[in-house]
Amino acid sequence: MLLAGKRLVITGVLTDGSIAWHAAKVAQEQGAELVLTGFGRGLRLTERSAQRLPTPPDVIELDINDPDHLAALTSGLQDRWGGVDGALHAIAYAPEDALGGNFLHTPAESAATAFVTSAFSYKSLAVALRPLMQQAGGGSLVALDFDNTQAWPVYDWMGVAKAALQAVTRYLARDLGGDGIRVNAVSAGPLTTVAAKSIPGFAGFDAVWADRAPLAWDSTDPTPVAKMIAVLLSDWAPMTSGEVVHVDGGFHAIAAGGGAGGTVAGGGAGGTVAGGGAGDTAAGGGAGE
C-alpha cells in the first residue's frame, strides 16, 4: 500500500464532506496511521466525522494560532509515535469583511487574520512537526490551496492569503529540504463542501469549470484531490518539493471556455463569481477545509 507504516497528521476535517476527510479516508485505505485535529466549535464535528472513517482515529484539539496548542501537539505526538512522517494543512479562515467584494474597504486587522490563519499557519504547523519529522528521517507536508495567480471576484483577501500560502510553500521547501522534508501544495478545483457553501457566489464555479476545464470536473467528488494528496505524502514523490500541483480538471491551463459565448470568470455583467477557494475556506467561524 502507498502509505503503509506512515504516521500522518490531518488538520481541517469538519464533516465527512470535507476535502480533508476524504484525504484521511484515502490515507487509511493506503495503510497510514492517523490523528486528526480540530478546534473550538468545530471540534465536536471533527470527532463525529472521525467515527465515519474506516478506522476512527484520535482527535487532538489544535488552535493553529495558539503557541501552547502547537507545543502540546509536538509533545503529544512525541509520546504517541516518537516521529511523524507527514501532515496535511487544510486550515483557512477569512473574516466576512475580507470577502464578498469588499477588498478596498477591508480593515488591516481582517486582512492580517486571513493571512495568519490561512498562510502563516503552514509555517507554524511545519515548525511544530519539524523535530518529529527529523526523527522520522524526513517526510512530506501538503497544503490545500486554490490557485490565485489571477484575481477572482469576491474572493478578495482570501485570494491574497492563498497566494501567500503558495509563497510559504516555496520558502518552507527551501528551509526544510536539508531535513529531507518535502513541502508542496495541492490546488483543487471547486468542491461543494459545507465551508464552500458559506462563500458568496460559490455556486457560480460549476458553470465556469464546466465551460473551461478540458476534463469533466465533478464538484461533488473530492476523491481525485485526496488521491493526489496521498501521492505527495507517500514515497512516490521523493524529489518533488516547492510545487503547486493542480487537481482541477485542467482548468488552470486553459485561457477561455470553448463554447459559444463561453463563461467569463470575471466581475462584469453575467460574470461568474469565484469565491470558495476550492471548497476549503470557512468564511465565518470555522477554520477547516
Image (tube, rainbow, N blue to C red):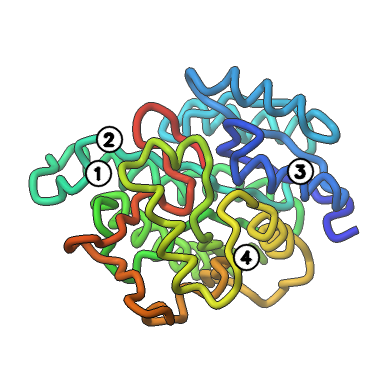
Tag shown at residue 182? 4
Disc 3 to disc 4, C-alpha distance: 22 Å
Above or below: residue 213 compared with residue 193: below
Above or below: residue 146 compared with residue 64: below
The residue identified by callout 3 is 25
Disc 2 to disc 3, C-alpha distance: 30 Å
Local packing at callout 2 (Cα closer than 10 Å; few below 14, some 14-19, many 20+) is some
Which SS class for mark 3? helix
Q: Does the residue at mark 2 contact the one at mark 4 (Cβ under 8 Å)?
A: no
Count numbered badges in the picture.
Answer: 4
Which residue sits furthest front? 260
Amino acid beneath label 3 = Lys
First reached walking from the N terminus: tag 2 or tag 3: 3
Above or below: residue 234 compared with residue 241: above
Disc 2 to disc 1, C-alpha distance: 7 Å
Tag shown at residue 95? 2
Amino acid beneath label 4 = Arg
Residue under the image location 23 percent in, 44 percent down: 100
Disc 4 to disc 1, C-alpha distance: 32 Å
Local packing at callout 3 (Cα closer than 10 Å; few below 14, some 14-19, many 20+) is many
Name the one closer to the observer, 33 or 82. Answer: 33
Disc 1 to disc 3, C-alpha distance: 31 Å
Tag shown at residue 99? 1
Q: Does the residue at mark 1 contact the one at mark 3 (Cβ under 8 Å)?
A: no
Which SS class for mark 1? loop
Q: Does the residue at mark 4 contact the one at mark 1 (Cβ under 8 Å)?
A: no
